[in-house]
Amino acid sequence: MIYLELLWVFIQVGLFSIGGGYAAIPIIQSHVVEAKGWLTMTDFTDLITIAEMTPGPIAINSATFVGMQVAGIAGGIIATIGCIIPSAIIVSLLAFLYFRFRSLSFVKDTLAILRPAIVALIASAGIGILILSFWGEGGFTTDVTALNIVSVIIFFSAMFVLRKYKTNPIFVMLGSGVLGAVFYLLL
């Protein structure tokens, strides 16, 4: 039964995550954390961190991770398949239609309309993770004492290095991890 639930959840993720992996994050969160309760919000944030750091698409990495957490290796395989099947079918169909009808203004207009919605989905996921990092599972509050100063310092340091020096994001992630380990081990 758990395998069918995993398959169905990740078929939905694969089917409705229009815009790529980052657009899938709020959908995965909705199903896995809120509806099913398979992961806590902290576990989900760890999942996103691991899924971003490992090679491959974030939605597929997330599906594999959730499936393995919930039902072992078989669950990881089933969740991954569930996430891939709708995307493969939809992309194949859309590629055929796009190459056949790409010169039509309707196609161009539709793509232009979808762009802001995708940006909003990605921003929503990013803001949710930022709030969790800064304030914890309690969420946003105006109480300054609830703010995780270490997370804020690392975040703004990373943003400064990325913007000012155009450093490779991989090095910034590694540096942030080292800084976080040092801060949390010393404090």
Image: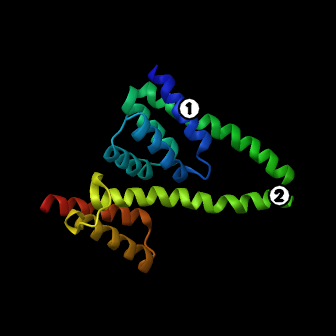
| Residue 76, percent from left and from top | 45, 31
Disc on the earlier residue, 1 or 2: 1
Q: Residue furthest top?
A: 1
Residue drawn at (51%, 23%) of the image: 4
Left or right side of 88 for 80 = left
Query: In the image, what residue type sits under mark 1?
Result: Ile
Residue drawn at (58%, 51%) of the image: 20
* C-alpha gap between disc 1 and disc 2: 33 Å
Which residue is denoted by mark 2 in the rendering? 106
| Residue 32, percent from left and from top | 43, 38
SS for dot 2: helix
**Could you say which quadrant of the image residue 171 lies in?**
bottom left
SS for dot 1: helix
Query: Can you say whether 20 is above or below 167 in the image?
Result: above
Residue drawn at (45%, 25%) of the image: 74
Query: Can you say whether 72 is above or below 143 in the image?
Result: above
Determine which of the numbered discs, if any, sits on residue 63 in the image. Answer: none
Q: Residue furthest front?
A: 142
Which residue is denoted by mark 1 in the rendering? 81
Confirm whether residue 102 shows in the render: yes
Q: How busy is the neighbourhood of tag 1: few (under 14 within 10 Å), some, or many (20 plus)?
A: some
Query: In the image, what residue type sits under mark 2?
Result: Phe
Q: Viewer-proximal residue, 72 or 27?
A: 27
Residue drawn at (51%, 41%) of the image: 60
**Could you say which quadrant of the image residue 67 lies in?**
top left
| Residue 77, percent from left and from top | 49, 29
Left or right side of 85 for 71 = left
Q: Viewer-proximal residue, 66 or 121?
A: 121
| Residue 182, percent from left and from top | 19, 62
Q: How busy is the neighbourhood of tag 2: few (under 14 within 10 Å), some, or many (20 plus)?
A: few
Q: Residue furthest left?
A: 186
**Could you say which quadrant of the image residue 87 lies in?**
top right
